[in-house]
């Protein structure tokens, strides 16, 4: 069903049932109230001219303390958190964790929780949107307990965002890991 530009009413004119159904009923069936099908709420975004879609904020949490010594982004023993959502071309991805280093390694190693995207879009995990103890090249080490990222250029459809973990050296510990995705 598509939005129909409403007809102009003329005083005294009888409105045919087909016109009423086309210009009133069908257009009302394209409003937020008619399209709100998820009982958990959500919000609406424009997906084109005179077109909206309901989007649901989705959250996943893994509350298990685990460690890695991987210097490239990888899964921990308990994969995730993982969130699968229907997106348009954008989403806001929020990751958060408690990251620590018990390796006593010199040089202030980084312990990072990032995310990768698969499905309609493929994006590799990167330091640019990592949370944790992050040592960016040429910069001081920073503590990000969470990190927000506006992701653009997504292919609309079903996209899966999954947390990935790495360290620069030693062993990094991660717990209270969470991911929140606001599909736009």
Image: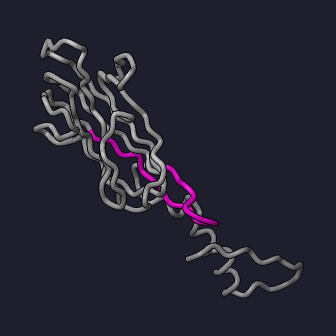
Q: Position of residue 35 (x, y in %)?
A: 51, 63
Q: Residue at x 47, y 54 (%)?
A: 153
Q: Residue furthest front?
A: 138
Left or right of 150, for residue 174: left
| Residue toward you, 125 or 26 | 125
Quadrant hosting residue 12: bottom right
| Residue toward you, 26 or 55 | 55
**What's the colour scheme?**
one colour
| Residue toward you, 145 or 72 | 72
Q: Position of residue 149 (x, y in %)?
A: 44, 38
Looking at the magenta stretch, what is its main secondary structure? strand
Magenta region, residue range: 42-60
Quadrant hosting residue 81: top left
Total numbered circles = 0
Magenta run includes residue 63: no
Q: Position of residue 157 (x, y in %)?
A: 40, 62
Quadrant hosting residue 64: top left
Q: Residue furthest right?
A: 11
Q: Is residue 170 above or below residue 159?
A: above
Left or right of 88, for residue 23: right
Quarter of the picture containing the N terminus is bottom right
| Residue toward you, 29 or 103 | 103
Q: Residue at x 89, y 78 (%)?
A: 11
Q: Position of residue 137 (x, y in %)?
A: 35, 25
Q: Residue at x 21, y 19 (%)?
A: 100
Q: Residue at x 22, y 38 (%)?
A: 73
Magenta run includes residue 53: yes
Q: Is residue 122 above or below residue 107?
A: below
């Amino acid at each position: 069903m598509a939005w129909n530009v409403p007809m102009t009413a003329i005083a005294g004119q009888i409105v045919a049932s087909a016109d009423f159904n086309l210009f009133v009923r069908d257009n009302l069936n394209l409003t937020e109230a008619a399209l709100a099908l998820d009982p958990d709420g959500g919000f609406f975004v424009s997906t084109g001219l005179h077109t909206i879609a309901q989007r649901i904020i989705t959250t996943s949490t893994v509350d298990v303390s685990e460690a890695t010594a991987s210097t490239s982004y990888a899964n921990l023993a308990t994969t995730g958190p993982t969130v699968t959502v229907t997106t348009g071309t954008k989403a806001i991805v929020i990751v958060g964790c408690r990251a620590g280093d018990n390796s006593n390694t010199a040089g202030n190693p980084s312990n990072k929780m990032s995310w990768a995207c698969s499905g309609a879009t493929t994006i590799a995990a990167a330091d640019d949107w990592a949370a944790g103890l992050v040592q960016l090249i040429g910069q001081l080490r920073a503590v990000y307990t969470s990190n927000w990222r506006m992701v653009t250029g997504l292919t609309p459809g079903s996209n899966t965002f999954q947390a990935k973990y790495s360290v620069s050296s030693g062993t990094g510990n991660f717990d209270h890991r969470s991911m929140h995705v606001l599909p736009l």
